[in-house]
Image: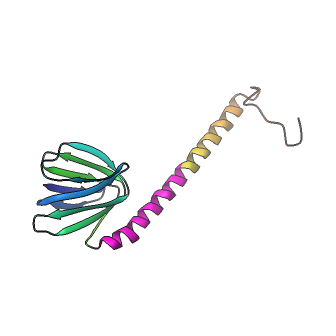
């Protein structure tokens, strides 16, 4: 099989002689061998591992992304991808960083949504000052 791993900035890997690949999506880990059925799945923040015909084993930490199998080609498009022979380093250092970044991004999105909702409420109050549910609220302690 051929494996291609890309990010928005680079082609991380192109490997022609993959005999087995293991990846993980939100439902769990799975394996792919030559002549696998076509498929597409969203990847979890995880390590993708593969073995070549020569017996070499390589690993790639991915920060999410999409894996597709079409014909004899496995394609992975990820936000970030780091290849290393040291699986332990990938699992402890790189995946920890990917998870931290994902958590920070999620918090930022929540904060942005709160600000957006507050802005919409304020605009509605300005546009409809006498509407009973949108109008000015009494100050604390007043009814």
Q: How is the image coloured?
A: rainbow
Q: Main secondary structure of the magenta part?
A: helix
Q: Residue at x 28, y 56 (%)?
A: 23
Q: Position of residue 28 (x, y in %)?
A: 35, 52
Q: Residue at x 63, y 37 (%)?
A: 120
Question: Is 38 above or below relative to 102?
Answer: above
Q: Residue at x 89, y 42 (%)?
A: 141
Q: Residue at x 24, y 47 (%)?
A: 68
Q: From the viewer's perspective, is 122 left or right of 137?
A: left
Q: From the viewer's perspective, is 9 left or right of 54?
A: right
Q: Nearer the viewer, residue 15 or 38?
A: 38
- Quarter placement of the C terminus: top right
**Is residue 89 in the magenta section?**
yes
**Is residue 140 in the magenta section?**
no
Q: Position of residue 75 (x, y in %)?
A: 22, 51
Residue sticking out furthest to the right: 142
Q: From the viewer's perspective, is 116 left or right of 65?
A: right
Q: Quadrant of residue 2?
A: bottom left
Question: Is 89 above or below relative to 80?
Answer: below
Q: Position of residue 71 (x, y in %)?
A: 13, 45
Q: Which residues are magenta?
A: 86-109
Q: From the viewer's perspective, is 8 left or right of 133?
A: left
């Amino acid at each position: 099989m051929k494996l291609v791993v890309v990010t928005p900035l680079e082609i991380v890997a192109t490997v022609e002689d993959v005999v087995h690949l293991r990846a993980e999506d939100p439902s769990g880990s799975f394996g792919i061998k030559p002549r696998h059925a076509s498929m597409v799945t969203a990847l979890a923040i995880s390590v993708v591992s593969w073995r070549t015909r020569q017996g070499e084993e390589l690993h790639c930490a991915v920060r999410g992304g999409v894996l597709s199998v079409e014909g004899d080609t496995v394609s992975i498009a990820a936000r970030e991808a780091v290849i290393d022979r040291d699986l332990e380093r990938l699992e402890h250092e790189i995946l920890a960083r990917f998870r931290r970044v994902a958590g920070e991004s999620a918090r930022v999105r929540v904060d942005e949504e709160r600000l957006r909702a507050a802005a919409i409420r304020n605009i509605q109050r300005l546009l409809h000052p006498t509407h009973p549910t949108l109008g000015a609220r009494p100050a604390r302690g007043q009814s």
